Structures are given as C-alpha cells and as structure tokens.
Amino acid sequence: MDKIRIALAGNPNVGKSTLFNRWTGMRQHVGNWPGKTVEKKEGTFQYNQQEIEVVDLPGNYSLTAYSMEELVSRDYIVGEKPDVIVNVIDAANIERNLYLTVQMMELGANLVLALNMNKFAREKGLKINKKQLSQLLGVPVIEIEAVDETGSEELLKTILKISKSPNIVLGRLEYGNEVSEHVKQIENIINQDLTGADNKSMFDAPSSWIALKLLEDDPEIIKKVEESGKGQRVLKSVKKIQRHFNNVFGDDADAAITDARYGFIAGLVSESVKKPKIDKVTRSDLIDRIVTHKYLGIPIFLLIMWLTFQITFTVGDPLGGYIEEAFVWLGETVSASLGEGFLTSFIVDGIIGGVGGVLVFVPIIFILFLVLSLLEDSGYLARAAFVMDRFMHKLVGLHGKSFIPMILGFGCAVPGIMATRTLENERDRFLTMLIVPFMSCSARLPVYALLAAAFFSAYQGWVIFSLYVLGIVVAIVMAAIFKKTIFKGMSAPFVMELPPYRIPTAKGAIIHMWERGVLFLKKAGTLILALSVVIWALSSLPVGVEYASQESITGQIGTVLSPVFAPLGFGEWQATVAIIYGFVAKEVVVSTFGILYGVGEDGSGGTADEAATEESSGEISSKPASGEVSVESSDETASAESVEEVAPEEDPGFIAAIQEVFTPLSAYAYMVFILLYIPCLATLATIRRETNSWKWPAFAAGYTFVVAYVVSFAVYRGGLVLGF
Amino acid sequence: MSLAMATENDNLRIVQVWHGGKFKKKLSEMGIYKDSQIKVIKNDIPGPLIVDVKGSRLIIGRGQAQKIMVDFS
C-alpha cells in the first residue's frame, strides 16, 4: 500500500506534540525547515498495515505571512498537499482554535478535527455537540485525549477513511455577502488572468484563497502576483475593493475578513456548544491566583528556578564527573598500552580529551531539558514569563521570557542559549543569546577560586561575588546598547497565551529531552572535537617539543600575543596561553596554569582540577583537555592518583609561582577578562546552531573580546591610578 | 477607556485597536479585535495584564494594552 502523508496542525499548546510522540515514538526526526530557524518534526508509524508519514507543523494561531512558523505551515500545506491534516483543537478554547481551522478550509485542506482536552472543557462547564459541529463544518470531528488512548482508534480510522475520500469544504465557509461577493469578483479575474491553460492555478492554491490573501494585503501573495507579470488587473481590482471597504465601512478589508471569519465561527459555536451561564472557577485559576500574585509571584518563581538549577547540577555534575573519570581512565589505559609517543598523545590528548570534553556536558544538558520541558508542558513557564516581565522590561528591555535563559547561563551558557527557543521573536532571541554568556558560568569558578584564594584570601567570597555582579551589570548595559543600535526598534510587543495547567506526560518530556540533547551532541560535538584536535596539534608541534611548552606552537603564539595583554597587567605568555585554551572551555584555564607554571613533574597539576572541583560545589567538572591528560600520558612513572593530591590554591609552590607573576590588581583584571571574554567553543557552537548562521557566533566572539578588553583595561589602569 | 485602565472582572467590549497592521493582525488572531468581548483577570500596576478572550487567557504587555480601547458591554 502507498504511504499516506498527514500533518498535525493547531494552536500552540493544544497537545499536537503529545499526539505526535504517541504515534511516532522514537521513529521521529527533528531538524529545521530548510533555511529557517523553525523546528521541523517528522516521523512515521503504522496503523492497520498502512504506513503513515506525519509532520508536526509548528503551533499556529493563523496562516498569515508575518511569521516564519506560519509561512512554514502555509507553504507546507500548499506545496506538499498532505493527504490529511489532523487539526488538533483545544475543546476549552474552540472559538479561537477554529480561526486556524477556517483558514485551512480556505486552502481546501482535507481536514479532520481532533477535539482534545475535553476533560478540562467539561470542568469549565462547556458542552460540545460534536455531531452538530461536524455537520456545520463538513469535516469529521473526533473526541480524543492526546495523553491516553481515548478516541485514538476512531481518529486513526477516520484518517485512513478520508485519505481515500477527501472532504470538499471550500463551499462551507459563509463569510457574509459583502466579503463573499468581493472575493468572488477577484476570484474571477484570477481565474481569467492567472490560471494556466490546463485550468491549474499558478499558485497551487484555490483562487478564492488567493483572492482573500490579496484583500488582506498579504505581502507574500502580493509579491507572487506581481512577479507573475500578469497580475495588474487583479491588483487594481483589489485596490479598488479595499478603498470601497474603507469608504463604506470605515475599516480595512482585512478587518472585515477577520470579522467575517469570527462571525462564521460564532454562528457555528452558538449552535453546537453550550456555555455555562457563569464562568466557573477552575483549579488552574486558583493556582494562578497564588503563582501570579502581585507579591508572591516573584519569590515563587525564584524558588522554582533555584530548584531547577539545583536538580540539574546536583544530579548532572556527579554524572559528568563519572564520565570524566571514565575518559581519564581510558586515556591512561591507552597510553599505558601504547607507550609514550606522538600517536599516543594524539589519541589520548587530542581525541579522548576532545570527545570527553563534550560528553561531560551531556548529563547536564539532558537533565536540564527534562526539567525545563516538564515546566513548560505543565504550563508554569508562561506564568514565569508574566511574573518576571516587569523587571526584564525595565532593566533590560527584554520580556519575561528572556529571564530563564539568563538564569540557566549561571550554570552553563549552552543550555541557556538553547532555552532561548521559547522566545518567538527572533530579535529578542538573538539579543538574549548575545548577553547570556555574561552570566558567569560555573566553568569559570575554578579560575576565580584559584586567583581569589591566592590574592584575596580574606575577601575571597566578596571578590567572587563582585565578579558575578559585574557580569550582570555588563549584560544589562550591553542589552541597553544593543536595543538602541543593532536591534533598534524591534522589540516584540508582548502578547502570549496562558495555557491551563496540565500534568506533563513522562513520555513527552523524555522525548523532548532526547531530541535536544542529541542535537547538541551532534553539532556542538563535532565542532569541539575538531578544534580540540587542532589545539592539540599546535601544542605538540614542532615534533619533539615538550607538550604545551613555550617552544610548542601554542607557546609561541602565546609569546607573540602576550604584548596584547600587557596593558591589562597580565602580559606573560602563560597567561595568554591560558586565555587561548580557555577559548575551548573555561575550566581549562586552571589546568593550563597548573601545567605551565610547573606544579611539578609528579603530576599534581592533573589533580588540580579534581581538587578544585571539590572546592566549589555545583560546578561542571573540569574537562580533560590538553593540559591535564598530557601530564599523565607523558609521564610513565607516576600516575596522578598515586601522588598526594594538592589543590593548586593550597600548593605553596604554585601560589608562590603565580604571586610572582600577578599582583592582586592584575589578578582581578585577569578574572574580569575571563569573566567577559569570548564564550567557550561549546557556547559558540550552540549559538551557531540556534541562529543557523556563522555571523552571530562570530559577532558574539568579537564583541565579547572587545568588551572584556575594555573593561579589564579600565579596571587595571583605573586601579593603578587609584593606587592599588 | 484603554484596556490598561480597566477594572478586574468587568465584562468589556473592544471598540478600537490602535495598533499597526502586523501586531493588530496578531491580536485579532488571538481574539482581540473590534467588537469582541474581553475581560480583565489581573491588572496589577506595574506589569503586564492577564485577560480573558474567547475562552482563553492571554498575557498582554501594559504598553500594548494602553492602545486597545474598550467599553462596557
């Protein structure tokens, strides 16, 4: 039997994805629509020996040309002509949900309505007569509960049925005389001028739909008609009719059409839905009274954010630590069996180090996304956006939804950036992505701990705290600057749906988590691995040189570049090299220090990371990148573990070494630089993935370097002037 | 009066939407357009509003609400 192709369409939050996941399980594939930053989900499943290919279209309220998501859906329906479109409807919200339905009917889509969330509708006191609704619309209406099997059988049967005998629904829509007549006029001209000899419309869509779009001033359709070269008569008529509407009704044809649609829907609904006399107060409402309460709202939000953070890093860190240990073990085993040498170094330091570096992130990413999708699916995230909007708006010029990515950035910028997906407005998304890296991520903590302990022992806590605050301040300032320059005047007006609370499904949450985690691994992983190998290569050449010494290429680069940083107070080649390595991952700065400032041949440098990890809780374990593992592989005699482990900040020799190189002021300037400069590779790779371009990560890298340099300079020079 | 000044729980009707084309369309997709019914659920100053339209709840920024004119229905 031939494959059937179907699509899932509907408003956001109606349960489309739940249905999609239940049908396709793991047989689904998530990517992007070609050339767009909109997620594309497709999958296959079998029913009654029939193979069915299903695409989960983005949640839409309408099919205008004004947003990527709507265009993607619209183009899909017109271009791909799926056999059936399953329109998932929130039963408690029928009127607004039907606004999309009628637009799909205008396109001549072969629809079946899946009425979901009937329990909640009943709780609200709504009674829906699905037979009546079905008759009035001319399409089958099936009651389902996407979370379980209710109605599933009937829905699938109906899908198969109508895939073979499609409904014709174009004639069902009644938009009143005014609108209908004018649409017919335009339609006729379109049929005369723009239809080919074989009577097929140039645009693959019903002429009546094209007429409607032209009257609505749809930019995409207007462009297409203009480009066809034969559209003059049509466009002229459209203009004439639009003027007519303005003169007679004092309003756009656009508004009249919207009115007509809602009018049609209202008529339908009044005949098929019984509403309660007085609005019932639902459980959702009661929870909301507390959660969005004027004074309680924010503390509750902070509590939930803190919990999210805690869970993610408390569970994720140790798991990441196991992964790191496994890689270290692997590295040792390989070097033990292969012996010293170039090949060993390549495998151990380059590949195992590089791959391990990426995989350490995995537990954190996965767990974070699990928690986030639970929060999102339950409906809480919308309330969070509401509660935090007030501050976000005043301070940063962004909306409440941007707050969550920033909070996540304090743990790790990668999940923070991925969380910007919830921001629909592209400019807000990009702006948020650009400032998330300033939220001092946990990878930087070891560096602070080290330097603060060495130079500010009594005031460690305050020094480190000041850095976090500085990060936030810089973020706010940069956001303000961006808003006035490159993102000028593009703030999204804030309107967002507040879906009712729901109990998230385990399956849905796990699938969400899996999708995002795997994507991260694939894209970010290959990039990091590649660049880690490059850095390894640069540190191992010229051949025969001691790994990561001043004579290696890396060391030479460090030496050459160090004058750049001299004005900031830290112009030694080692500090420069640490900055370069820190580009791959911020934790590496500490291990680099350990190697370069020579914490001894017995490999206590390698333990620096483990000890530092113990010192500060809740951080990502240091990645086994070039510096650390090399000590163990090039040293056959002592393995790091057999030597007494001393943390660098406790090793008097090490501290003495740094104290000769830095002063308290330059150490602070250095920390400021580390706080602000180029986001780590993983972060840049994530930005690249989320923006689908190289321009943004490049910009992020460039501007953060400049900001870091300027601020660090100001701190150092200013401090000198003030006599520190 | 503007939606931003409305009292919680009053049943209102929209009389005018003073927004530009694109956002006006977005609003109408969500149920906010001339002559539709609307009710304010939460109006704490400062901050966005929560309203009820066509059976669903929406969050609207205060600035946006100021440009939507309503009257008692």
Image (cartoon, coloured by chain):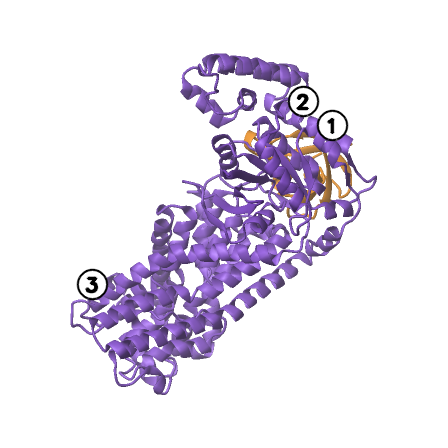
Chain colours: A purple, B orange
Which label belongs to residue A174?
A: 2
Does residue A691 appear in the picture of this structure?
yes
Of residues A637 and A603, the one nearer the viewer is: A637
Residues marked 2 and 1, same chain: yes
Is residue A28 rendered to the left or right of residue A495? left
Do tag 1 and tag 3 residues touch (Cβ < 8 Å)? no
Instruction: Give residue A277's quadrant in the image.
Output: top right
Residue at mark 2 to residue at mark 1: CA–CA distance: 10 Å
> Where does label 3 land, which residue?
A560
Chain name for mark 3: A
Of residues B28 and A154, the one nearer the viewer is: A154
| Residue at 36% in and 79% down | A607
Crowd around label 3: few <14 · some 14–19 · many ≥20 (10 Å): few
Q: Is residue A584 above or below residue B17?
A: below
| Residue at 43% in and 15% down | A230
> Where does label 1 land, which residue?
A267
Crowd around label 1: few <14 · some 14–19 · many ≥20 (10 Å): few
Crowd around label 2: few <14 · some 14–19 · many ≥20 (10 Å): some
Earlier in the chain: of badge 3 and badge 2, it is: 2
Is residue A381 rendered to the left or right of residue A534? right
Amino acid found under the numbered disc labelled 1:
Gly
Outermost residue toward the left?
Answer: A543
Chain name for mark 1: A
Chain name for mark 2: A
Residue at mark 3 to residue at mark 2: CA–CA distance: 76 Å
Residue at mark 1 to residue at mark 3: CA–CA distance: 77 Å
Q: Position of residue A324 (x, y in %)?
A: 40, 72
Do tag 2 and tag 1 residues touch (Cβ < 8 Å)? yes
Is residue A25 rendered to the left or right of residue A325? right
Q: Is residue A199 above or below residue B15?
A: above
Q: Is residue A161 above or below residue A290?
A: above
